[in-house]
Image (spheres, rainbow, N blue to C red):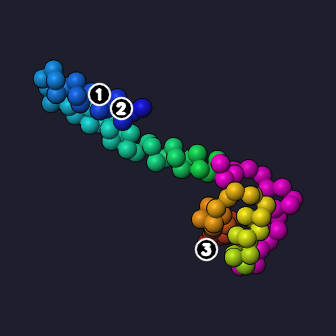
Amino acid sequence: MFALAGLAWIVYVAVSGASWAYLGLGCLWLVLAACLIPQARQFSRRERLGYDRAWPAAEQDVLTLVRQGRNIEAIKRYRELNPGVGLKDAKQVVDGLKPSPGG
């Protein structure tokens, strides 16, 4: 949406011969879109993968495997419990469950 608005604004400025300030405004819209689109996609992916949900008792064994350092088995178990989740996505979830080095 922002990218389309920015592009439309730049075209309008080019056609109408408006000042450079208006051209800068259109470029600002494009930069804003370039920053927001990846953030929105990441938020959607995190929501789809269930990063913020409570873990049911059936998935506690995934957490146990991660705590034991058995990451490959944790990834396999996560994929068994969540059909349709790819290897890359499961690895990202399991990596997110690892305790932080300072904690």
Residue at image coords 61%, 73%: 101
**73 vs 94, nearest the viewer:** 73
Residue at image coords 19%, 25%: 13
Residue 72 percent coordinates (x, y): 69, 76
Residue to which mark 3 is pinned: 101
Magenta stretch? 48-69
In whole angstroms, how far apart are the C-alphas of marks 3 and 2?
A: 43 Å
Q: Which of the numbered marks, if any, corresponds to residue 8?
A: 1
Residue 53 percent coordinates (x, y): 74, 50
2 and 1 marks in contact (CB < 8 Å): yes
Q: In which quarter of the image is residue 81?
A: bottom right
| Residue 37 in sight in this render | yes
3 and 1 marks in contact (CB < 8 Å): no
Mark with earlier residue (3, 2): 2
3 and 2 marks in contact (CB < 8 Å): no
| Residue 25 in sight in this render | no
Identify the amino acid type marked 3: Pro
Residue at image coords 20%, 31%: 23
Residue to which mark 2 is pinned: 4
